[in-house]
Amino acid sequence: ASSAAPASQPPPPSTDGTADPAHESRVLALQLLLHILGHPVAGPSILRAGPQFHYAVRQYLCTSLLKNTTSADTAVAELSLRLFVPLLRHLRPVLRVEIEA
C-alpha cells in the first residue's frame, strides 16, 4: 500500500520537526509561477513561447491549478487561486477553448 497522500490533501505533519520537501517544492513552484506571470514583461514573451509550452500550460498547469484550488493546504490553495488572473491575462488567446468550456 502506498503512503503517498493525494495532491489535494495537506502533507502529514513531520515527526522530526522538519518541513516536507514535496510541500515546500509545490509552494515554491507556485510562488515562482506567480512571480513570473505577475511580471509586466511576461505576457508578450509567454505568448511567443511556442506550441509545446502552450500545450504544457493547457494540459498540466491548468489541471494542477484546478486540483490545487481544492487543496486543504491553505498556502497551496491561495497561491493557485492567485495564479488564475495573471494566467488568464497573459494566456487568454492560448486558453480560449478551455475558458469557453
Image (cartoon, rainbow, N blue to C red):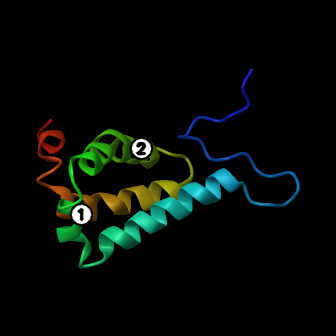
* Position in image of residue 9 (x %, y %): 59, 41
Picture quarter with the C terminus: top left
Name the quadrant containing residue 55.
Answer: top left
26 left or right of 56 in image: right
In the displayed orientation, state which residue is furthest to the right: 16
Closer to the camera in the image, 70 or 47: 47
Mark 2 against mark 1, which lies toward the viewer?
Answer: 1
Q: Is residue 44 above or below residue 18?
A: below
For numbered disc 1, what is the local secondary structure? helix
At a point 74% along the width and 59% down the height, the residue shown is 19
For numbered disc 2, what is the local secondary structure? helix
At a point 36% along the width and 70% down the height, the residue shown is 36
At a point 59% along the width and 35% down the height, the residue shown is 6
Please tell me the numbered disc located at residue 64. Answer: 2
Picture quarter with the N terminus: top right
Mark 1 Cα shell of 10 Å, populated few (<14), some (14-19), many (≥20): some
Please tell me the numbered disc located at residue 46. Answer: 1
Q: In this view, does 60 lie above or below 19?
A: above
Q: Please name the amino acid that badge 2 sits on.
A: Ser
Mark 2 Cα shell of 10 Å, populated few (<14), some (14-19), many (≥20): some
Answer with mark 2 or mark 1, whichever residue precedes in sequence: 1
The CA span between labels 2 and 1 is: 19 Å
Name the quadrant containing residue 84.
Answer: bottom left
At a point 46% along the width and 60% down the height, the residue shown is 30
In the displayed orientation, state which residue is furthest to the bottom: 40
Closer to the camera in the image, 89 or 59: 59
